[in-house]
Image: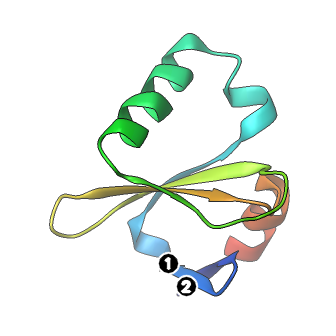
Amino acid sequence: MYLHLGQDIVVKMDEIVGIFDLDTSTISKTTREFLSKAQMAGQVKNITDQLPKSFVVCKKKDGGQTVYISQISSTTLLKRSV
């Protein structure tokens, strides 16, 4: 199965580690540090020109990691994944 994240980006369901709401999860210092390190490592892909609402962490089979920043809410993404 696949999950559409917006802007023609689709990821395999088995690669998704988590779907997170940007408003509530970035309150945590740990989450902010994680996103900052991922950004510095070039692992963040911003797939929106609008206000971002969520981020999705994906692990690739080769061990790599990608963090997608999406304009679609985490609630909507979760509903799409079921």
Residue that numbered label 2 is attached to: 2
Q: Residue at x 49, y 34 (%)?
A: 35
Q: Amino acid at mark 2?
A: Tyr
Q: Amino acid at mark 1?
A: Val
- View extreme (left): residue: 62
The answer to whether one can see residue 65 in this image is yes
Circle 2 Cα neighbour tier, 10 Å, few/some/many (<14 / 14–19 / ≥20): few
Instruction: Give left or right: position of 45 versus 74.
Output: left
Against 18, is 62 above or below?
A: below
Residue that numbered label 1 is attached to: 11
- Are the two marked residues, 2 and 1, in contact with CB atoms closer than 8 angstroms? yes
Q: Secondary structure at mark 1?
A: strand
Number of numbered markers: 2
Instruction: Give left or right: position of 55 versus 53.
Output: left
Q: Residue at x 78, y 28 (%)?
A: 24
Q: Residue at x 83, y 56 (%)?
A: 75
Viewer-nearest of labels 2 and 1? Answer: 1
- View extreme (top): residue: 29
